[in-house]
């Protein structure tokens, strides 16, 4: 008795396989990110990383006594897209991550944007991860590759860097502010 | 910043779309086990294609006129050489690509002869079902014509079917509706839409109203912003 039930606010972090979603959440979460990972078995995936998210990852940021912000990371592979549907419901906004060094993931990111835009058209921003690497594409070129208008924020990102992740989240909140 | 990758997952249409958008000048290098091409771009259009034995040969000449002189090509021959080399380049489906912006200096009197929009549409007619799925993955997508679509359509040399499809794009009809009303096959429509997007003829329809799945007040949003800033 007396314990307040905290209201849960949800931001979804989506993106292709190995775009850095788990790292993005981990960098700002106040708890260690809760992971639902399995060993990667598919050819072409196991060479990239040994474990992959199969249901969702989540991290937590307490806002006040009444509110908690959850960051939910979706599984990257489209064979788990039923989870995108579950996570999209009731979200405040969406962060779509791409691996700036791997243009093969740009098309996958476009498909993910198509999916959420047709079902849960919440405000969204795109984070171009791995911008610290030499082979990273310029965010403006990634914008063109994703067929995104000038009014969509396409931001440079290094998911290992807290300030960089904060910058992407604040940009999303700025977008959200336009709709309240 | 790089523009580099693999042709199997990022095809010529995708590359040309990016180079055209910002009217980039520079050299696109395409290489596989058999061939190495240097594709010279001026303002996002292909000006010249040259085959080389070693990639570093490309970077020996900064002046475009020197390149032509070495290859024994006159200004008058540019069109003929381009038309002869273009099918060889576009037949390459596997291999690496990388674009070096700038680097080459073009004389002002040399202008691109074949609009890139025409090449993009030509390539879009050969896209596989797997390729079109990358961009036209949902039959509920809605597109609208861009502001300067008439000018682009002129450069793109559309077929009668593509012109018909373009007529149906109005910012209201979904891909599925266009397919039914225009009575075109799904793959034909997806190929045309892929090409239209890459040329800039059409854009995805903007969402006018977005939905937030939480009853958010300005005060709560301010708290969230402050909390994130303080992390």
Image: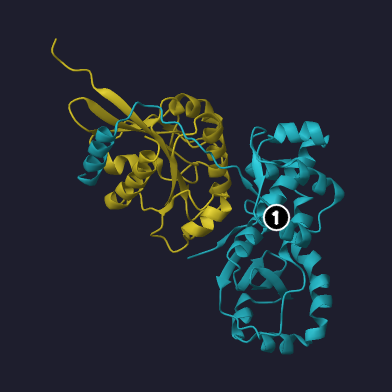
The one nearer the camera, B37 or A169, is A169
Residue A6 appears in which quarter of the rendering?
Answer: top left
The chain ID associated with circle 1 is: B
Residue density around tag 1, few if under 14, some if 14–19, many if 20 or more, within 10 Å = some
Residue found 40% across the figure and 41% down from its top = A21
Quarter of the image that includes the C terminus of chain A: top left
Which residue is outermost to the top?
Answer: A1
Figure check: A176 above or below A139: above
Q: Which chain is cyan?
A: B
Q: Position of residue B142 (x, y in %)?
A: 64, 38
Residue B133 appears in which quarter of the rendering?
Answer: top right
Residue under circle 1?
Answer: B149
Q: Position of residue A151 (x, y in %)?
A: 48, 50
Asked whether the viewer can see residue A44, the reply is no
Figure check: B41 above or below B64: above
Which residue is outermost to the left?
Answer: A2
Q: Which chain is yellow?
A: A
Figure check: B183 above or below B144: above
């Amino acid at each position: 008795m007396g314990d307040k039930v905290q209201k849960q606010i949800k931001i979804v972090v989506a993106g292709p396989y190995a775009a850095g979603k788990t790292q993005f959440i981990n960098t700002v979460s106040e708890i260690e990110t809760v992971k639902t990972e399995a060993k990667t078995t598919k050819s072409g995936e196991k060479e990239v990383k040994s474990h992959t998210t199969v249901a969702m990852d989540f991290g937590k940021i307490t806002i006040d006594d009444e509110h908690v912000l959850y960051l939910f990371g979706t599984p990257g592979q489209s064979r788990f897209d039923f989870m995108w549907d579950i996570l999209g419901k009731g979200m405040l906004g969406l962060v779509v991550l791409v691996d700036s060094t791997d243009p093969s993931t740009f098309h996958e990111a476009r498909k993910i944007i198509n999916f959420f835009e047709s079902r849960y058209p919440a405000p969204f921003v795109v984070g171009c991860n791995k911008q610290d690497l030499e082979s990273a594409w310029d965010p403006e070129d990634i914008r063109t590759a994703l067929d995104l208008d000038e009014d969509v924020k396409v931001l440079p990102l290094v998911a290992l860097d807290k300030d960089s992740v904060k910058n992407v989240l604040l940009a999303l909140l700025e977008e959200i502010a336009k709709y309240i | 910043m790089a523009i580099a990758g693999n042709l199997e997952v990022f095809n010529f249409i995708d590359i040309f779309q990016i180079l055209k958008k910002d009217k980039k000048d520079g050299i696109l290098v395409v290489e596989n086990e058999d061939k190495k091409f240097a594709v010279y771009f001026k303002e996002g259009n292909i000006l010249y294609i040259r085959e080389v034995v070693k990639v570093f040969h490309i970077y020996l000449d900064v002046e475009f006129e020197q390149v032509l002189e070495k290859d024994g090509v006159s200004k008058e021959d540019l069109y003929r050489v381009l038309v002869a080399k273009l099918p060889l380049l576009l037949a390459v489906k596997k291999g690496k690509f990388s674009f070096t912006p700038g680097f080459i200096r073009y004389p002002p009197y040399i202008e691109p002869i074949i609009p890139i929009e025409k090449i993009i549409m030509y390539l879009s007619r050969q896209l596989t079902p797997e390729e079109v799925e990358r961009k036209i993955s949902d039959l509920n997508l809605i597109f609208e014509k861009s502001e300067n679509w008439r000018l682009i359509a002129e450069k793109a040399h559309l077929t009668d079917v593509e012109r018909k499809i373009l007529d149906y794009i109005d910012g209201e009809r979904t891909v599925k509706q266009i397919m039914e009303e225009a009575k075109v096959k799904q793959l034909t429509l997806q190929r045309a839409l892929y090409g239209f997007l890459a040329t800039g003829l059409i854009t995805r329809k903007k969402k006018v109203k977005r939905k937030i799945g939480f009853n958010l007040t300005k005060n709560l949003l301010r708290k969230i912003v402050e909390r994130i800033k303080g992390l």
